[in-house]
Image (cartoon, rainbow, N blue to C red):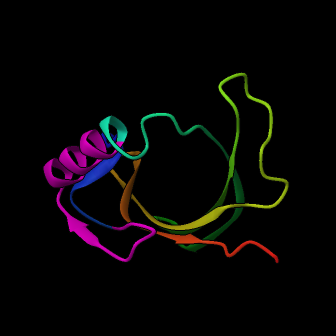
């Protein structure tokens, strides 16, 4: 879940909590998947990538809730995320990520 993150990566979750470091991110991910995310499923789509330099990129993704069978629950994204990617030793790594919940139209 966090193998593609730099050792000192920083990630903000949808609730605004910022977690720093791959080990702390792994611990938070394990707790989330064992708890409130246990029965949640999502499909992700990369919606934009901008290369700021040959070794730095900013990417956006959209997340939509799905059923266990992969059927869409949300037509519109339930969450969007911003990633800062860095290329080191020929490999792309996530240095930062921030998730933002998208309010449902009502």
Q: Considering only vertical position in the picture, is 93 above or below 85?
A: above
Quadrant occupied by the C terminus: bottom right
| Residue 40, quarter of the rendered image | top right
Task: Spot the residue most to the front.
Answer: 106
Q: Residue 28: horizontal and vertical position, in percent? A: 24, 51
Q: Where is residue 48 in the image (x, y as percent from the top left)?
A: 71, 65
Figure label count: 0
Left or right: residue 85 versus residue 25 is right
Q: In the displayed structure, does residue 58 sit left or right of residue 78?
A: left
Residue 24, x across and y down, in percent: 16, 54
The image quadrant where one finds the N terminus is top left
Depth check, front residue: 43 or 105:
105
Residue at 25%, 43% (x, y): give it: 31
> Which range is magenta?
12-32
Q: Which of the 4 image quarters holds residue 100?
A: bottom right
> Residue drawn at (81%, 76%), measured in percent from left and top?
105
Is residue 15 a member of the stretch shown in magenta? yes
- Determine whether, in the image, residue 22 is placed left or right of residue 67: left
Compare residues 95 and 12 and report the one nearer the observer: 12
Residue 68 at x, y percent in the picture: 65, 25
Q: What residue do we see at 50% from left, 34% from top?
A: 39
């Amino acid at each position: 879940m966090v193998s593609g993150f730099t050792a000192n990566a920083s990630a903000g979750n949808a609730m605004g909590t910022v977690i720093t470091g791959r080990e702390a991110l792994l611990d938070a991910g394990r707790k989330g998947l064992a708890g409130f995310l246990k029965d949640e499923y999502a499909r992700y789509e990369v919606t934009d990538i901008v290369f700021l330099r040959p070794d730095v990129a900013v990417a956006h993704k959209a997340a939509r809730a799905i059923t266990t069978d992969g059927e869409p629950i949300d037509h519109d994204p339930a969450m969007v995320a911003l990633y800062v990617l860095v290329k080191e030793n020929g490999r792309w790594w996530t240095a930062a990520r921030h998730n933002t919940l998208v309010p449902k139209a009502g």
